[in-house]
Amino acid sequence: GDSVTQMEGPVTLSEEAFLTINCTYTATGYPSLFWYVQYPGEGLQLLLKATKADDKGSNKGFEATYRKETTSFHLEKGSVQVSDSAVYFCALSEYGQNFVFGPGTRLSVLP
Amino acid sequence: GAVVSQHPSWVICKSGTSVKIECRSLDFQATTMFWYRQFPKQSLMLMATSNEGSKATYEQGVEKDKFLINHASLTLSTLTVTSAHPEDSSFYICSARVPGASNQPQHFGDGTRLSIL
């Protein structure tokens, strides 16, 4: 079945550092890909999405490009802030079916 | 944008009590809603898919009689944890998808933290 793999956390960075959180997926077709963010004690918020190969999703300085050839959707941000500290989930959805989430990557940004 | 409201946000109750959690889509109609459970520092585990006007579809290993789901209208799904015990303590999150194209994201409620004493 479909699956999503993310890099192991936690990831600890200093403020203004460059962030990459790797995400790769396995799917039988052509899924839509998503990044969600979860702040402490809260639900998940959609961060960005991409629906087809080579699409780039972006929001709040975060970017991710749908790479079909490498089945990847890595999340990047050029300069992280303390307020970016959260858990980030990569997810896919195929043919409008249930979402499949990765295990999540906890990010801590230090001032 | 699409908003999903979940209530209550925090519940503390005694063992043996039944607890109801509500999930509402505020500005759209959701024929399908999803219920997840999240253990500390872990990912979301899909418990069941709630379908308006019909029975919920439960994931393997989820007890139907323990976690009762009702989706009586296009904007409301409820999860009732029956005769809750300490092992049911967890963070429960609902989500809904705006009807339409298959590439629509899921929109999540803020979650309910359930603590059973």
Image (spheres, rainbow, N blue to C red):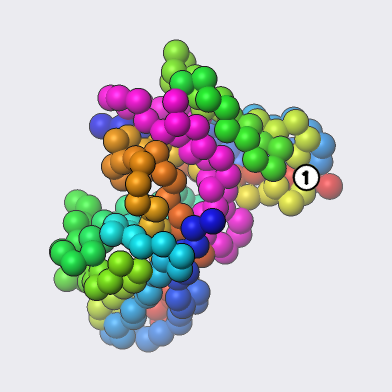
Using the image, determine if residue A80 lies above or below residue A40: above
Q: Main secondary structure of the magenta part?
A: strand
Q: Is residue A62 visible?
A: yes
Q: Quadrant of the N terminus of chain A?
A: top left
The image position of residue A52, as x and y in percent, is 44, 25
Where in the figure is residue B27, as x and y percent of width and height?
Answer: 46, 65
Instruction: Give SS at disc 1.
Output: loop
Q: Nearer the viewer, residue B40 or B26?
A: B26
Give the image location of residue A108, x and y in percent: 69, 46
Q: Is residue A26 magenta?
A: yes
Q: Nearer the viewer, residue B2 or A79?
A: B2
Residue A18 or A36: which is nearer the viewer?
Answer: A36
Front residue of this view, candidates B42 and B29: B29
The image shows residue A58, relative to residue A54, as above or below, that is: below
The reply to whether residue B89 is visible in this rendering is no
Number of numbered discs overlaid on the protein picture? 1
* Residue at position x 38%, y 53% in the image: B97
Question: Which residue reaches farthest top?
Answer: A69
Read off the magenta span.
Answer: A23-52
Q: Quadrant of residue A81?
A: top right
- Disc 1 residue type? Gln
Q: Position of residue A59 (x, y in %)?
A: 65, 40
Pointer 1: what residue? A81
The answer for which chain carries disc 1 is: A
Q: Residue B102 in magenta?
A: no
Neighbours of disc 1 within 10 Å: few (<14), some (14-19), many (20+): some
